[in-house]
Each structure stands twice: as structure tokens, then as C-alpha cells.
Image (cartoon, grey):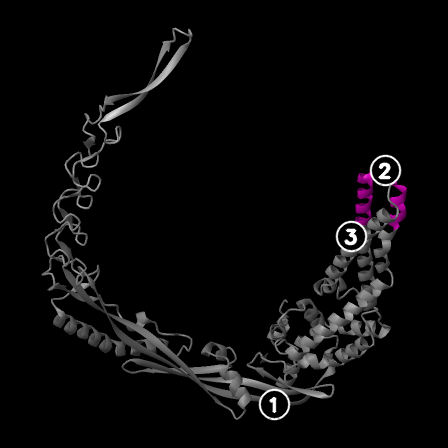
Amino acid sequence: MTALPESDAAHRETANAPGDPGARLLLRVGDFVEPLTRFDRSHLSMAESRHDVISVMMRQTYRAVFEVGRSEGFGALPEGVAEVADAAALARESEAQLAASRTALAAKLTAWAAEHGEDPLAKPTVADCFVQLPPLGFVDLCKTCNATGLLICSNCKGAKEFTCETCNGRGALDCQTCEMTGEITCNTCKGMGTVITQKEKKHRNQVTGQTQVEHYQDSQPCAMCGQSGKVKCPMCSGYKEVTCRTCEGRKMIVCAHCEGMGTEKCAACDGHGKRHYAVSLTCSIRETFDTTTRTSDAEIAATLKARGGIEGILQLASSHRATAEANNDTLARDTMASIPVTSIAIGVGEGTAAIRGYGERQDVLDYRNIAAMLLKADMDRLDVAGAGTTLFPPKVTDELHAALSDVLASEANVAIAMAGAKADADETAREFRGAIAADYVKRAGAAVRKGLGRAYWAALARGPAAVLALPLLFAPVDLLMRGAGGGARIAMLIAFMVATFGVAVIGHVLIVRKLQAKLAPAGSPRIRPIIDRLGLTAAWLITAGAVATMLSLIVAGLVSSLFPSG
């Protein structure tokens, strides 16, 4: 929702503005509230007026705080750190830096106060109070490793390797394949020493004259083992042992912890052989702000205190005077401001709203629900008219249209309706700067939603809703097209769906125009955007599309089932 800004005339006192502060404030209130409602400013009357000048004492305190930061690390000093001899020198030099900065601080604050103390918006910076000094540090050789960065390996004690535990330093293991014999059974003769082969020979039977085949076995010495039945073990090649895979025959294993170096990195210095220690002096400005309002009106005091910093209060001040003083580490500035405050009681119907204008421009920080007070009667009328309507079946009265017309004649109600149903009521109310409270925003949003919704659906029910029955005409058309084929029938079915939806869109446009003529014949506000924002357009078109599709399919199915094609 777009904020509702005040006009430029409300920000300045024009030449013909009333001289009385109360009258000027009433004019200012009217400039803001009148555009929000359908009522002119004659409905606002001033019951009483008071003009005061409130003194506000503001104290700004700026305290410079020094902090000594300490750091340490491995190796040499980082770049930019000034080196000192040792820890004692570091302590002396850092204390000297701090003392010098504190000594110089008082003079710097005094000089700054003399130059800027009368400007309440000026603030001292760190650069105004402190000259950055280089960090100090020293390097200490590592005593753990004697500045070498290395220690004897805690695992191998410097030996670099261990005797292989797998083979006990032999470098070899007993061959399990041949069980340390160096030989295995010959696979060719199966340990027999000979190889038996099947042979056959043919001979002719002289009696019968037939050739006969005779099978027999022939035994030959085994060529693989030379008749011994044993061959050399392929795993150990006859040596009865195999190379140890753990040490690969070396008999020793390299220490995994030091990777065979015999030394490891010193953890105390991370292998650098030395550590560095440094201190740095920094400064920060800590600011505090306090106000004292010289008034017995607790509301005025609370309002001014809620302005926050001095900038917000000075925007309202007609005059101010500031003085500053400094001591060793703190600068304090006291600013006395005079703020005109005009208070008026405005009669609105039977109610009264107390409005205050702050400063020479009479800025109104809270319009005290005054617009909602003007609009309450219209909203009451709409609630009563809405109670005489029904949604199912849709039924409205001329009184509802008249009440809606009055409600939508006020810009505030239109803005609330356009904010949408899901808008945050508090956020919407803030846009009106208190002229309309969140409770009214919720009430107006619900009432307009209900009233305009029922008027819209009732208007549809009196005519355009009948177009949803258009798919019923598909039945006779479908019977006449039986000979045209399935493709033509489907195309005609789709045409009926599209035509129904199209006529529904046209019906929506006509209904919106009708409501525009009834509710806002002058053309303002435009009803169509409000109907769109309330979701009524989408609801009707979704309903029309769904009904057109479902009814068309149902009619087509019934025709096919009742009158099956031959």
C-alpha cells in the first residue's frame, strides 16, 4: 500500500495561515484527514487549544576508552610490529604508549570541544582523540627444541626404523605352499612318476576278414618331474622361504611417525624454533545520550524521549544552545532546546480527539484515530446493511449498495481494501500515521470484503451465471454430428468449453461496469481493481472454467451412454 503523504502546504505556514497556533494546527489536521474521508473539514471543530514551549535538556557523553590487545604466535613478528628486547621491555614500552595516549587525550578533547562543542550534531571520532601507534612485540626462542624446531621422534627415539615384527628381522617367511620342503607334488603325474596314456591299435582278423580296434594303456616316464613325482615349489622356487611382504626383505621397517627422519616437529613452536608475543593499543568512543523534559505532562515527555537521538529532538526545536566540557577521558555536551507544543481538542461527532503538534511546523506524530471516528457511522451502516444479505442464495438490497457507495467514497477505506485480505493491520495503520487504528483497519477490510463480495455474486446470479448452463446445448449438437467422426465431436466439445468461459469473462466485465455505475458513478474510485484485489475475479473465472469443463464432459458422457453410435 502506498503511504499517504501530507501536502507541501502542511509543511509550511502559508501567508494567509491563521496566526493562532491552535487554528493553524486544526488547519494542518484538516489538510491530512480530509483527503482520507468523504467528509470535509467542517466536521472538525476545535473545543480547546493550548500552546506551550517545552524545555528539553539533552546530555551527550563521549568517553574515550583505551584497550591493550595481546596476541602471540609462531615464528617471527608480523609485519608492522616494532620489536623490543624481551617481555620486560614489552611491558615498559606498552605502558609508556598507554600513558602518553592518556596524557594527550585530555588536550585533544579540550581542543575538539572548543571547536565543535556548540554544534550538537558533531561527534568526536577516534582520529580526534588518538594517534594510532605501532604494535610492539618481541621474539622468544623455543626452549623445548633449543630453537631448532625439531625434537627426537617420540616413536622410534631417533632410530628412524624398527625391526620387522612380521618376519622378526629375517626378511623372509617360511613357505606355506611347500611346507618348507622346497617341493610340491607333480601336477602332471600326480606324484606317480609316470604318465599313463590311452592308446589304440588296429589289426585285421584273418578268419573273419574284419578290422578290429584294440584299446590299451601305455605308461611313460613323467617328463615334468623326471619320474620323481615332485617338482620345485613355484612360490619359493625351492628355497623353502618367501620374501616378507611387510619389510620387502629389508628386515627393517621405516618409522611411520617421523617418516624415517628420526625427528618430529616441535609442537611448542610449530617447527619455527621461536614464538612471538605482541601488544597493540586501540581506542574506541562510547556514546551515551539522555534527555530531561521540563514538563508535568507525562505524554509529552514520553513522546519526546521516544524520538531517540538528539537529531530527532532538534528537528522539532525552535531554538537550542549547546555547551561542552572535557576532562581526562570524557567529553560532555549539554544542549538546551525549546520545543513549541500546540495541543488542541477536536470534536468529531460525539467524540473528542486530543491532537498535539510539535515544533514550529507543528508535526503531528499521532492523529489519534480521528479519521476512523469520522468514518465510523459509514461503517456501522455497512455492517447493518450486510446483515440483511445472504451469500447462498445470493441476495442483496439497495441499502447495501448505498452503504458501499458511501464507504468507498473515502480514500482510506479504498486503501484498506486495496491492501488485501492478508495485509498486516498494524502495518497498514502505520501508513495512516495514527489517523486510523489497526482495529478499524481489520473491521473495514472485512466489511468491504463481505459487502462488495455479496454485491458481486448477487449481480452474477441475476444473469451472467446462467451462461454456465451453455454446455447443455452440446447434447443436440452432438447427436447431429454423429456421422462427422470422433475428431469433429471432440473439437465441438472443446469449442463449447471455450465459448462458455469466454461468455463468463464478458459477463464479469458487464457486472463490474454495473457495480461501477451503482457504487461510484463519477468514476472514482475504480471498482475493478478493488474486485481484482479481493480475489473475486479469480474466484469467478476459476469457477466458470471448472463448471464449463465438468458440465461439458458430463453431457458428452451421458449422450454417448444414452445414444450409443451404431
Percent of width and height locating residue 205? 39, 8
Does dot 1 land on a helix, a strand or a loop? Answer: strand
Residue type at mark 3 is: Thr
**Residue mark closest to the camera, 1 vs 3:** 3
Distance CA(mark 1)–CA(mark 2): 90 Å
Percent of width and height locating residue 288? 39, 80
Q: Residue at x 39, y 12 (%)?
A: 212
Residue type at mark 1 is: Arg
Q: Is residue 408 visible?
A: no
Q: Residue at x 63, y 67 (%)?
A: 2
Quarter of the image with the C terminus in it: top right
Query: What number is the disc on residue 50?
Result: 1
> Cβ–Cβ below 8 Å for labels 1 and 2?
no
Quarter of the image with the N terminus in it: bottom right
**Residue mark closest to the camera, 1 vs 2:** 2
Percent of width and height locating residue 415? 68, 69
Residue type at mark 2 is: Ala
Query: What number is the disc on residue 549?
Result: 3
Left or right: 58, with 75 as reference point: right
Numbered range of the magenta stretch: 473-498
The residue at the far front in this view is 207
> Cβ–Cβ below 8 Å for labels 1 and 3?
no
Going from N to C along the chain, the mark reached first, 3 or 2, is 2
Residue 485, magenta (yes or no): yes
Question: Which residue is tagged 2?
Answer: 484
Classify mark 3: residues with Cα within 10 Å, few (<14), some (14-19) or many (20+): many
Foreground of the two, 338 or 18:
338
